[in-house]
Amino acid sequence: MATQHSRSAARVMMAPAVFLLLVWMLVPLSMTVWFSLRSYLPLRGGDQGFVGLENFVRFVSSSAFWPSIVTTLMIVGGALLISIVFGILLAILLDQPMWGQGVVRILVIAPFFVMPTVSALVWKNMFMDPVNGLFAHLWRFFGADPVVWLSEMPIFALVVIVSWQWLPFATLILLTAIQSLDGEQMEAAEMDGAGPLSRFFHLTLPHLSRAITIVILIQTIFLLAVFAEIFVTTGGAFGTRTLTYLIYQRVLESQNVGLGSAGGVYAIILANIIALFLMRIVGKNLDR
């Protein structure tokens, strides 16, 4: 049992790390808020003074703001759906005894370690290119016209690219959860006459609920900041401009640091709202 002295010593030892973490978080946040309240145009005279909430009003009243929010949520939702559904299927498959199981697991997890830029380039040039891409050759083989994925179905194409990279993460978490499932319960259910689907929906899926909520929480935090895939493939065209990409355009392309910083504050607010909502769900699942 920890004494008052040991707890005080632990706080003292943790204090430097906590202080550095707060500085690491608060300094960039404070600078973002500061710039969002000013008109800062690097190529047009620099800091032009305090403008209050003008940048926030301009950013939210832009015709691109709400479409970017919708696009962001569509990509996040689509990638989560694919990651969870196929992650469960892959986890169940990888849990079965097979020849070369270790090698197969490494190959399944490998895409997670590919850099987003490289992943986007591979999908853009090797798979989705309408002339020389793999999908184009398959379409021609079956007598159909190739699909120009990045202009005709851009959101779906981006969801596929992002999902391919995050599917291994979901698979790894869900596979770990499946391996902790009590085998005796499964055997007892099978002996009682429960079929594979019944065992899945009444035993496996409830057991995976905590792991699924963890996957949703972690992936959502990272998916809200998807940028490289959009930059490499569509450049924000064809309705693929997310909130993150809109901020990039305001800061670097329009050279309006104040307006982009206001967008950054909106992004922080959106991320925290979603995180709080997901944390409540995770908390309820962990209390069961």
Image: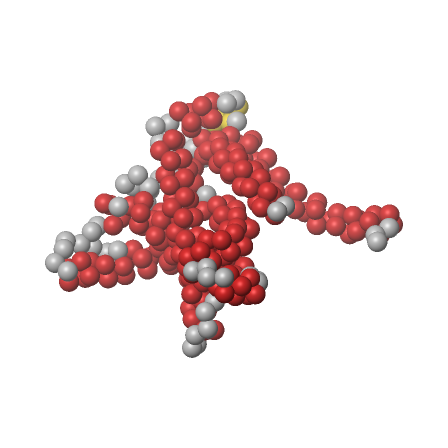
Q: Which image quadrant for residue 179?
A: bottom right
Where is residue 174? Give x, y as percent.
50, 58
Q: Which image quadrant for residue 93?
A: bottom left
Taking the image as drawn, is residue 147 in sight?
A: yes
Where is residue 229? Give x, y as percent.
37, 50
Task: Tell me what residue is drawn at x 55 percent, y 51 percent.
Answer: 210
Residue positioned most to the left: 143
Q: Is residue 251 above or below residue 57?
A: below
Where is residue 165? Give x, y as percent.
41, 57
Q: Which sits in the foreground, 221 or 97? A: 97
Task: Tell me what residue is drawn at x 54 percent, y 59 percent.
Answer: 177
Q: Which sits in the foreground, 87 or 238? A: 87
Q: Is residue 54 above or below residue 93?
A: above
Q: Is residue 205 above or below residue 251?
A: below
Task: Tell me what residue is drawn at x 84 percent, y 53 percent.
Answer: 1
Taking the image as drawn, is residue 252 in sight?
A: no
Where is residue 158? Give x, y as percent.
34, 49
Task: Tell me what residue is drawn at x 29 percent, y 55 percent.
Answer: 124
How was the colour assigned to the protein in this rendering?
secondary structure
Residue positioned most to the bottom: 99
Q: Which sits in the foreground, 145 or 209? A: 209
